[in-house]
Image (cartoon, rainbow, N blue to C red):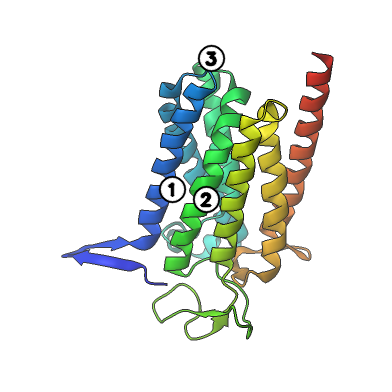
């Protein structure tokens, strides 16, 4: 809502960027602690994080480009240079980057995957607060008591009462973090944390899309791009959970 926090000469510190940075740094710090606690090498988390973040940002932008491809063909520079990102592209790209890093370093990807995903949920929760400051990822117009109105200069339509989807998403991600954190501490579910993330995040994301108002992200039939992706990620999460459950029973 108030994104320009401090301006020093030509440099402006934006709340969106600050919250993203805080989210990533907090997630890396916690992931290192959890990795050491669960018998893994916490020093490898930094490499996993760097690989995941770079790959995540890349695929987040690529996914956004695909959602506005006609506009990209007309003016590629304007699309690449905008603040447009697709979180799902970032998540899947981050997982891919982290997986390739683990493969290159001969690390057990699934073990690190389970440890890292609660921290990813925490990073998302903090990052969504940054979305609130910037006004991006805004909701549909509403006249309920919970509506929020953004000022001019925000990415959200100014002066229009909107569903505070950024704060709803942040709250949901904090809840998801708590669930996954507890699941990681439970011997019965510690090996299925990543699968739980894919399942629960996809359900939450599918639901929140119904009240998202930034329709520029594109649609596939009657579904938003994120809802379409959520269905497939949900199925992947369910399949992974069932596979891990059967594998544990056989063991």
Residue drawn 37% across and 71% down? Answer: 2
Please report whichever mark, 1 or 2, sits nearer to the chain's N-terminal start. 1
Left or right, residue 41 beside residue 223 = left
Asked if disc 1 and disc 2 are in contact, CB closer than 8 Å, the reply is: yes
- Cα distance between the residues tagged 3 and 2: 28 Å
Whole-percent x, y for residue 89 in the image = 58, 47
**Location of mark 2 (residue):** 124
Q: Is residue 83 visible?
A: no
Residue drawn 77% across and 33% down? Answer: 241
Please report whichever mark, 3 or 2, sits nearer to the chain's N-terminal start. 3
**Location of mark 1 (residue):** 23
On residue 106, the disc is 3
* In the image, residue 236 above or below residue 42: below
- Cα distance between the residues tagged 1 and 2: 7 Å
Packing grade of label 3 (10 A; few <14, some 14-19, many >=20) is few
Q: Quadrant of residue 240?
A: top right
* In the image, residue 92 above or below residue 15: above
Packing grade of label 1 (10 A; few <14, some 14-19, many >=20) is many
Whole-percent x, y for residue 26 in the image = 42, 42
| Eye-nearest disc, 3 or 2 | 2
Disc 1, SS: helix
Please report whichever mark, 1 or 3, sits nearer to the chain's N-terminal start. 1
* In the image, residue 83 above or below residue 55: below
């Amino acid at each position: 809502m108030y994104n320009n926090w401090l301006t020093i000469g030509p440099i402006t510190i934006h709340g969106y960027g600050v919250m993203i940075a805080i989210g990533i740094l907090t997630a890396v710090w916690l992931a290192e602690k959890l990795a050491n606690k669960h018998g893994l090498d916490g020093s490898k988390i930094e490499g996993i994080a760097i690989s995941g973040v770079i790959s995540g940002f890349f695929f987040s932008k690529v996914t956004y480009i695909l959602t506005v491809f006609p506009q990209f063909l007309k003016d590629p520079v304007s699309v690449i240079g905008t603040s447009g990102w697709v979180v799902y592209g970032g998540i899947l790209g981050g997982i891919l980057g982290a997986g390739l890093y683990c493969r290159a370093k001969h690390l057990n990807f699934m073990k690190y995957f389970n440890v890292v995903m609660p921290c990813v949920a925490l990073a998302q929760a903090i990052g969504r607060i940054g979305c609130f400051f910037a006004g991006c990822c805004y909701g549909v117009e509403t006249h309920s008591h919970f509506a929020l109105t953004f000022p001019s200069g925000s990415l959200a339509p100014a002066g229009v009462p909107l569903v505070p989807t950024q704060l709803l998403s942040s709250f949901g991600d904090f809840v998801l973090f708590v669930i996954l954190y507890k699941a990681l501490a439970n011997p019965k579910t510690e090996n299925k944390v990543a699968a739980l993330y894919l399942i629960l995040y996809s359900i939450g994301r599918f639901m929140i899309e119904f009240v998202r108002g930034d329709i520029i992200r594109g649609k596939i039939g009657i579904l938003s791009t994120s809802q379409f992706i959520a269905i497939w990620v949900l199925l992947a999460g369910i399949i992974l959970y069932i596979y891990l459950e059967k594998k544990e029973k056989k063991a």
